[in-house]
Amino acid sequence: MAGSTLAIRARLGAWGVRVLQTRGFGSDSSESMDAGSGSIREAGGAFGKREKAEEDRYFREKTKEQLSALKKHHEDEIEHHKEEIERLQKQIERHKKKMKSLRSHD
């Protein structure tokens, strides 16, 4: 089991290991510690500051990506509505021409 736990930890990195530990996965029964105790961030120091900075950078980047996607979505929606307005205006003009031709037949 220890080998598979190490393989999982290597794949997930520090963040994934913390998630697994807080959910009760990946910890041996001999490691009966409070959830999150002993984490680098709680210990403070340079590693804790670095981890916090990396997490902050990650979430800023994710937020930036989400805002960019939202902006793109709204731009696409605006373009779609402009095209729809243009299509409807053409239909209105077509109907007006038909009505005009019907009036001339009266």
Image (cartoon, helix red, strand yellow):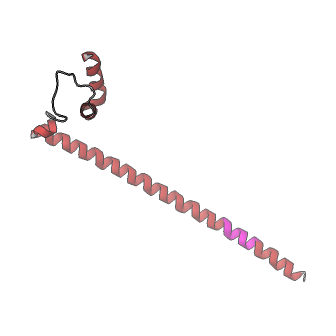
Q: Is residue 13 above or below residue 59?
A: above
Q: Is 106 left or right of 48, judged from the image as shown?
A: right
Q: Is residue 23 above or below residue 87?
A: above
Q: Which residues are magenta?
A: 87-94
Q: Quadrant of residue 104?
A: bottom right
Q: Is residue 19 above or below residue 67?
A: above
Task: Report the quarter where the N terminus lies.
Answer: top left
Q: Is residue 99 magenta?
A: no
Outermost residue on the right side: it is: 105
Q: Residue at image x 79%, y 75%?
A: 97
- The residue closer to the viewer here, 3 or 73, is 3
Give coordinates of residue 96: x percent, y percent: 76, 76
Give coordinates of residue 52: x percent, y percent: 19, 43
Question: Magenta stretch: dominant SS?
Answer: helix
Q: Is 53 left or right of 86, judged from the image as shown?
A: left
Q: Is 17 left or right of 46, judged from the image as shown?
A: right
- The residue closer to the viewer here, 1 or 32, is 32
Q: Is residue 93 magenta?
A: yes
Q: Is residue 28 above or below residue 39?
A: above
Task: Report the quarter where the C terminus lies.
Answer: bottom right
Q: Residue at image x 14%, y 37%?
A: 47
Give coordinates of residue 75: x percent, y percent: 49, 59
Question: How many numbered discs sit on the rendered protein?
Answer: 0
Give coordinates of residue 81: x percent, y percent: 58, 63
- The residue closer to the viewer here, 15 or 95, is 15
Q: Residue at image x 30%, y 24%?
A: 8
